[in-house]
Image (spheres, rainbow, N blue to C red):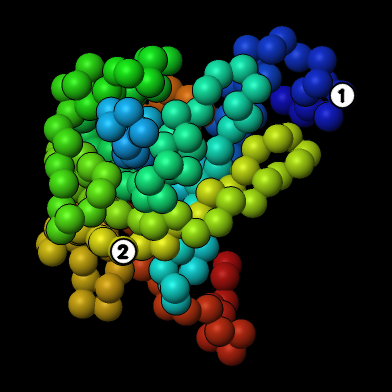
Amino acid sequence: MHLTNTDIEEADHVFRLNLINSISGIKSGNLIGTVGANEVANLAVFSSVVHLGSQPPLLGFILRPDTEVRRHTWENIKHSGFFTINHIHRDIIQKAHYTSAKFDDSVSEFEKCKLTEEFIADFPVPFVAESSIKIGLKFKEIIPISINATALVIGEIEHLIVPEKSVAKNGRVDLSVANSVGVSGLNRYYALQFQEELPFARVNEIPDFE
């Protein structure tokens, strides 16, 4: 199959949505936790979390346009200034997925999807108790992306909770040990399996590939 930009633009809406959402490959599956001005906890699936730097330790995620539905996650981050990122693992895939339903902001996805709020070290918004890897962040910046009315929301890590068995001596995290899952498109979940670790690539050490 070879599709041009015109082919993509003229394709059936659902086909185009599924194709472009999945063509970028497997992305990390996360639940972002927040609390609103009404003190109701919110939880939502995001597959757009990205590393932005290690000093300071920054992560970001893409916020979709709010022209059609309210974005409770962003409203809550603006209110409190904090959010959590919690890895989805194999045992909670279905519960995590259904947090994407369009609940009213007076309804907690934690309660509806039977996930547990966990408050750690006086951090003001909840983590997901069932998650193996949990990250507490302080909001730092939002960068608008004008071409499609999205935005990059950036936070600095204040708390990082990771199973010790998942962390190697050099600091690398084995996501397969933590049972973290990946997401393709909007609703396809994949198990992650470690394959190989390679050295830092140097020009004078490139192998003779056959």
Closer to the camera in the image, 166 or 65: 65
Q: Quadrant of residue 47?
A: top left
- Element at label 1: helix
Amino acid under label 1?
Thr
Which residue reaches farthest bottom?
Answer: 204
Near mark 2 (Cα within 10 A), the count class, few <14, some 14-19 or many ≥20, is some
Q: Is residue 105 above or below residue 210?
A: above
Dot 2 falls on a residue whose secondary structure is strand
Residue 21 locus on image (x, y percent): 58, 30
Taking the image as drawn, is residue 201 in sight? yes
- Is 11 situated above or below 149? above
Compared with 3, 79 (above or below) is: below
Tell me the tag on residue 6.
1
Residue at the front extreme of this rendering: 37
Q: Is residue 111 left or right of residue 23?
A: left
For disc 1, the neighbor class at 10 Å (few under 14, some 14 to 19, many from 20) is: few
Q: Nearer the viewer, residue 166 or 204?
A: 166
Please name the residue that numbered disc 2 is placed on. 158
Q: Residue at x 33, y 23 (%)?
A: 99
For image coordinates 55% across by 18% down, the residue present is 69
Is residue 59 visible in the rendered image? The answer is no
Ranked by sequence position, the earlier of labels 2 and 1 is 1
Residue at the spot 25% in from the left edge and 61% down from the top edge: 160
Q: Quadrant of the C terminus?
A: bottom right
